[in-house]
C-alpha cells in the first residue's frame, strides 16, 4: 500500500515547512491520475501522524483532475 509512504512523506514535508506550532488541519488535493486513492490516504493518516505535530489533526481531501498530490492549506496554532 503505497499510500502510507505517500502520507508519511507529506507529514514529514509539512513538519519541515512549518517550523513551530501544532498543525490542526491539513487540506489535500489528490489528482485523479495521481495513482493515489483518497480512501487509503485517509485510512493511513492517523498512523502516519502518530507522534508528530499533526497527531489529532483534521484531514480534508479534495479529488481534482490531473496528476498532482498537493497540500493546499494548513491550519497551525
Image (cartoon, helix red, strand yellow):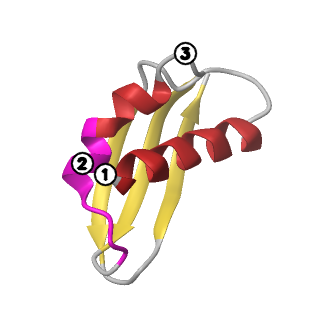
- Mark 2 nearby-residue class (10 Å; few <14, some 14–19, many ≥20): some
Q: CA distance from mark 1 to mark 3?
A: 21 Å
Q: Secondary structure at mark 3?
A: loop
Expressed as whole percent of the image width and height from the top left, the position of residue 30 reads: 36, 65
Which residue is at a point 51% across and 57% down the rendered structure image?
Answer: 72
Asked if the residues shown at circle 1 and circle 3 are in contact, with their CB atoms under 8 angstroms apart, the answer is no
Mark 1 vs 3, N-terminal side: 1
- Mark 1 nearby-residue class (10 Å; few <14, some 14–19, many ≥20): few
Q: Is residue 41 left or right of residue 12?
A: left
Mark 3 vs 2, N-terminal side: 2
Residue range (magenta): 34-43
Give residue 51's mark: 3
Which callout, 2 or 1, points to the residue nearer the camera? 1
Residue for badge 1: 1
Expressed as whole percent of the image width and height from the top left, the position of residue 54 reads: 52, 26
Q: Secondary structure at mark 1?
A: loop
Q: CA distance from mark 2 to mark 1?
A: 8 Å
Which quarter of the rendered picture does the C terminus lie within? top right
Give residue 11's mark: none
- Mark 3 nearby-residue class (10 Å; few <14, some 14–19, many ≥20): few
Asked if the residues shown at circle 2 and circle 1 are in contact, with their CB atoms under 8 angstroms apart, the answer is yes
Q: Is residue 12 magenta?
A: no
What is the residue that sits farthest to the right in this orientation?
A: 19
Residue for badge 2: 40
Mark 2 vs 1, N-terminal side: 1
With respect to residue 24, does 11 lie above or below?
Answer: below
Which residue is at a point 52% across and 42% down the rendered structure image?
Answer: 8
Which residue is at a point 45% across and 34% down the rendered structure image?
Answer: 25
Expressed as whole percent of the image width and height from the top left, the position of residue 14 reads: 63, 42
Q: Is residue 42 magenta?
A: yes
Chief secondary structure of the magenta portion: helix
Amino acid at each position: 500500500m503505497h499510500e502510507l509512504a505517500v502520507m508519511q512523506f507529506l507529514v514529514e514535508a509539512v513538519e519541515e515547512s512549518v517550523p513551530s506550532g501544532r498543525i490542526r488541519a491539513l487540506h489535500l488535493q489528490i489528482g485523479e491520475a495521481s495513482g493515489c486513492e483518497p480512501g487509503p490516504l485517509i485510512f493511513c493518516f492517523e498512523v502516519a501522524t502518530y507522534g508528530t505535530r499533526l497527531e489529532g489533526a483534521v484531514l480534508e481531501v479534495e479529488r481534482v483532475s490531473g496528476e498532482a498530490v498537493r497540500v493546499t492549506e494548513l491550519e497551525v496554532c
